[in-house]
Amino acid sequence: MPEAVVCVKPIPDPKHWDRLSLDPKTGVLRREGIPTVINPLDKHALEIALQLKDNFGWDATVVSMAPPETTQTLREALAMGADRAFLASDRQLAGADTLATAYTLAGLIKKKAPHFQLVLCGNMSLDGSTSQVAPQIAHYLGVPHITHVSKVQTQDGSTFQVTMDLKLAQLVLEGQGPMVLAVTKEVNLPRLVNIMGILAAEKKPLEVLSASDLDLDPSKVGQEGSPTRVRNLFMPEIKRRREILKGEPEEVAEELVNRLHQVGML
Amino acid sequence: MDFKLSEREELLRKSVAEFAQREIAPLVEEMEKTGEFPRPLIKKMGDIGLLGLVTSPEYGGNGMGFLARAIAVEEISKVSAAVGIALQVHHMACWPIETWGTEEQKKKYLPPLTKGDTLGVCSITEPSGGSDVFGMQTTARDEGDHWVINGRKCFATNSHVSDIMVIVARTGEDAKGRPAFSAFIVEPSYEGFSLGHEENKMGFRGAFSGELVFQDCKVPKENLLGKLGEGLKIGLATVNRVGRPGMASIGVGLCYASLEEASKFAKERVLYGKPISNLQAIQFLLADIYALAEAARILNYRANWMMDQGLPCDTEMTLAKYVATENAFQCARMACDIHGGYSCILEYPVQRFLRDAWVSIPSGGTSQVAKVVLGRHVVKNF
Amino acid sequence: MEGYKGFWVFIEQLQGRISDVGLELLAKARELADATNTYVGALLLGDFAEDKAKELFGYGADKVFLFSHPHLQIYHSLAYTKLICQAVKAEKPEALFMGATPLGADLAPRVAARLETGLSAHCVDLRLGEDGVLEQIVPGFGGAMMAVIVCPEKRPQMATVMPGVFPKLEPQERQGEVVPMEVALEEADLKPKVVEFKAKEQKTVALEGASVVICGGYGMGSKENWQLLEEMAKLLGGAVGATRPAVDEGWAPEEVMIGQSGKIVHPKLYIGAGISGVMHHVVGVQDSEIIVVINKDPNAPFFEVCDFGVVGDATQVLPALIEKLKERLQVD
């Protein structure tokens, strides 16, 4: 069976981000008491895999790199319909930036799903918002990637027409696996978990692997293998600007367009 | 003692909450306006497994059990208590059919009930009263190859969206000369059956509560549920073990709905330059809502857990129902207090919680009826 | 770090038109290069003559590395990655910036991975730390948290930067050098193949999840004026919402009502036109990243919670705004 691998990231529930704080002494992010959920866009990626499973008999495998207590989020992916899940979880892997994360996930995929046809990711995680991991996984797997995917079509389950959304234009690309796709929320509406799925998920394999299980170069994983460092974190003062513009319609319109451009809204 | 819900139950809660947000929340306003149950929702509830929570897999259910049901009804009721009662009464039809039904009855009726072809009805209450079961007027007469039922049932939840109804009727007298009752499964297509008046309620708007009218209604012989004369036992067990925890779960859902709305509003509402959540007067109200909500939930989970363990739990179920529905009203009232004038505006849901909580109190037996049960229990055991 | 010189900018183009973000980054690179006595390099990939490359000198570039080939007119991630990495390996720049646009976000990570260097995403500011390392300011958790990211040991230091955060320079008379680069591509570099390129259709989107929401209130005055909102939404690829009074007037369907009993939205940009800002509406939009309010009453409570407020009649301000936006976005 062709296999789709879906990368899933557990993140603090965006509904509770107002409860995030910084430890005043250490400057470390505090997220106690905030539940962990699947990064919402990753569910759209999983939905593509599940439709390939429904329509063309594909296998759907979920992979993740996260602390061990996040297995319940993977169980949720299994309850949605994935066949199996692998979690790379190890202190050695902690503190990874996108490059080290991508290297690790690519290692996990090479080990556990080497014959994949598609690797599917959410276009970005809501917490970090980098959009970087998918192309970097593709690099380490040595396959092409397409990000900002708003549409995936296939007649036969082997050739895919993929729409990439640039801001002012769309590219439609055609290709076959193996490749990596990173999807946006426009791509589909993820199915809800049903109760039969919850019960079925309890019998599906969910394997937790340590760094040493994965044949990785230790200098390329975790904080050690991350070229970027967080120098410090700070919480921006979120205040509304309350700039009031007055004048003739043409003047204020011009002024407003300039302001919107300055704040990156155009 | 273990108060931690399992991974399965946590996932159930999350999934049902997502379902309620996606599929039910957008319907609430229309339900409030029209009082009509959104029929397409039945199939959706079936697909996700909500209708089969207390039915075994061999009859199309998932058999997750009563604690799971309590969690599910609670999460549904946080978004719509009307859908909550439709769902819980549906379970009140499924459970007696599986518990007392013949193999043929189970095979015929449970799959369509769990799949979402229809919602179930379980109806005992009559215009003459609900808790006074001996006053029941509806009769079933044995006509040899079929039964003939005459009478009326009222306040039957799901009346207008159901194809499968469990009802109790008088079938003569027992050996001691007391009225004897039996349970029947009735399909609305039977000759002599009709739907009567549909109530226009102040709460649970969008859940049908209607009259079932039997005028020489012909019911096949094989539709007797349980043995002849077991009707009261079946009816009361269903009310005690399924209906009351169902109402309790609705109450718990309403408590938490009030808690969340009250807290959200208090943090958003700015008076004298600060959110009112900074005021102790408001914090005291929030603390009380929280205390009442948690107490109700724990009582309800315990009762349902006992049911899953096969322990006797009629008293615990009644206790949970009494506390949860009364607390729901208190919580909604305090949430309204926090909202001040805004509580009177239909845009804000706290007024709906108040109306729903009020209607939840007499449903499944008033608080006074519950206290009769609880009072007797105390006198006997303490 | 020893041996690495120059701040580089990838110049994004779409069908031969250079996007602003590249020019904005040239201005920032100019500032950083002047502070450290080095040069600004621009990477221009497309189907261009040298004249086009020379235009970049005026915006701050000293050297333009020009990759010109018909195949480069349209973006191909593998081809672009290969060429950029070849140039970086040969010239060893100190830093490389790209726009945090879909194209930049597709390309930069692949380039960074091939170069095995660090990359920070969606930066809102760049500055030099006391140790000379580039500090990249990155928002996380939807802006609830900001992080200062550095890449101390690998070069080039790479960042994608949000469009609009740096102003571009007014074009100046400046001289520079165009460096023609060899473009040698194989068939595999052009996969997956592009089968269609289409300018994005301008259309409104669903309210849920829309990144731009244009909302109208009672102050819109009539169903005819409501068209202005639709036009704005199309222009910005957003959705139209309404307050309850507007819905009650029949100007908009109930499904698009925003507020306590309607939908809760959290777009990047919310524009409220002819809305006074009663609490049950405001709660539905308060998580928007930027709130713009247009209302003729200067005392409307909505101005208290806005980022940009325009005091004026929405039915007069909106047509002017639509004209200016069309100019800015170069839409006919």
Image (cartoon, helix red, strand yellow):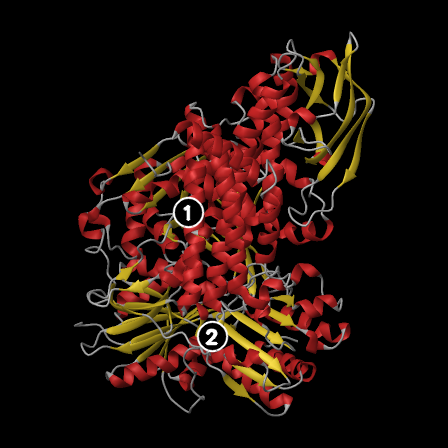
Q: Amino acid at mark 1?
A: Glu
Q: Which quadrant is home to the C terminus of chain C?
A: bottom right
Q: Residue furthest front?
A: B379
Hey, which residue is sitting farthest top in the picture? B144
Q: Position of residue C278 (x, y in %)?
A: 59, 73
Asked whether disc 1 touches disc 2, contact meaning CB atoms under 8 Å apart, the reply is no
Q: Which chain's residue wears label 2?
A: A
Which label belongs to residue B294? 1
Residue A264's label in the rendered image is 2
| Left/right of residue B332 with respect to residue C148 in the rendered view | right
Instruction: Determine crowd level at label 1: few under 14, some 14-19, many 20+ residues with C-alpha closer than 10 A.
Output: some
Q: Is residue B364 above or below residue B346?
A: above
What secondary structure is marked by label 2?
loop
User: Could you tell me if residue C187 is visible in this image?
Assistant: no
Mark 1 vs mark 2: same chain? no
Judge left or right: residue A252 versus residue A239. Answer: right
Count of marks overlaid on the render: 2
Q: Quadrant of residue C221?
A: bottom right
Residue at figure coordinates x 62%, y 63% from the top left: B344
Disc 2 crowd rating (10 Å Cα; few below 14, some 14-19, many 20+) is some
Depth order, front residue of B300/A167: B300
Element type at mark 1: helix
Three-letter amino acid code at the position of disc 2: Gly
Residue B363 marker: none
Quarter occupied by the N terminus of chain C: bottom left
Question: Picture coordinates of residue B369 (x, y %)?
Answer: 57, 35
B283 or A18: nearer the eye? B283
In depth, the one of C183 and A11 nearer the eye is A11
Q: What residue is shown at x 61% (from left), y 42% (from top)?
A: B83
Residue B331 is situated, as x and y percent measured from the top left of the image, at: 50, 53
